Image: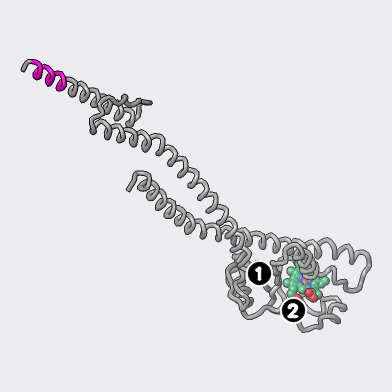
Amino acid sequence: MSLRLKFNLVMLITLAIGIGLAYITSKRILEDNAKQEVLLNADIMMEMAKGIRGYTVDEVKPIIQAGGHEEFIKQTVPAYAATRNFERLRKRFPEFTYQEATLNPTNPAHRATDWEKGIVDYFTSNPSATEYSGIKETATGKLLYTSHPLRITNPKCLDCHSTPEAAPAAMLELYGRENGFGWELNSVVGAQIVYVPMSIPLERARIALKIFIISLTAIFVFIWLLLNILLHFVVIRPVTRMAEQANLISKGQIDVPEFEVKGSDEIASMASSFNRMHRSLASAVKLIKKQRTTTVRSK
Ligand code: HEC
């Protein structure tokens, strides 16, 4: 097996092991990062929804009321403002879905499913928890979700959610007296949940992984080429020449020119040793030839 073949085989094995290890370790990290990034986006969206809720009840509703509007205006309902705003946001990010899963909702469309009740229960039994996230298996694939508790912290919320008597009459006409009441200050009434298909972070991770592996391979191939060129000029070429010269000398061509010594590396010192050996051999051969001719003459 030639030196070049041995060297390239070792490089190839190193490349395969290196790229394989990089793939395995970075795949997990990149997927986790992509999930965290998507969850962070979802968190921001939920905080926006919460912000709009507070804004509507604290700033919009008082102005409308001060204007003498007695009738119930749905635009002053925080949940309406929050969900309408999210609908607009979804035009740009259609993959995100927002739910206000509530145990006893004013609008039945917001009633928590059995699975969502589990999340609300978690927040009720863990009052210090501010976030809960995970992966949900569905018939259409895996969903990544994150949730925040819907806790009643603003007393103004109870204007419409404490008792039917306290709520605007027009609201009762629309939503009835049965649902969405009896909420208490500081209690958890539901959970804001944002769902995103798992394929979104996985696709982001796949693209990042592809770029990473391609650049790693490119760097490796570049180094491989460079080392091959170096191996050729620094080792293989001088050693082959020296071997050819040794071959000629061994066949009796003592007068071949001396090997050109370049630099001061190991190959150069081998070349000067080789030249020294060549010279001693040449003078030894000359001496033998001379002795032979004098013996012949003296006979
Ligand atoms: C002006 C009356 C009013 C006020 C004040 C009000 N809400 Fe509501 N709330 C409603 C109505 C009406 C709905 C149903 C909206 C719909 O049809 O989507 C609702 C819906 C909700 C929902 C969605 C679940 C459900 O019941 O359908 C949550 C959660 C909610 N409100 C929480 C709050 C919080 C928190 C506050 C205080 C920041 C608040 N609300 C203040 C009237 C009000």
Q: Nearer the viewer, residue 163 or 290?
A: 290
Image height of 276 relative to 48, above or below: above
What residue is drawn where x is 84% and y is 80%?
A: 174
Image height of 146 relative to 172, above or below: above
Dot 1 surroundings within 10 Å: few (below 14), some, or many (20 or more)? Answer: many
Where residue 116 appears, as percent x and y from the top left, is: 64, 76
296 displayed left or right of 30: left
71 displayed left or right of 48: right
Residues in magenta, as a range:
287-297
Task: Give residue 109's mark.
Answer: 2
Q: CA distance from mark 2 to mark 1?
A: 17 Å
Q: Which residue is identified by label 1?
A: 195
Image height of 22 relative to 269, above or below: below
Dot 2 surroundings within 10 Å: few (below 14), some, or many (20 or more)? Answer: few
Q: Amino acid at mark 2?
A: Ala
The secondary element bearing badge 1 is classed as strand
What residue is drawn where x is 85% and y is 63%?
A: 60
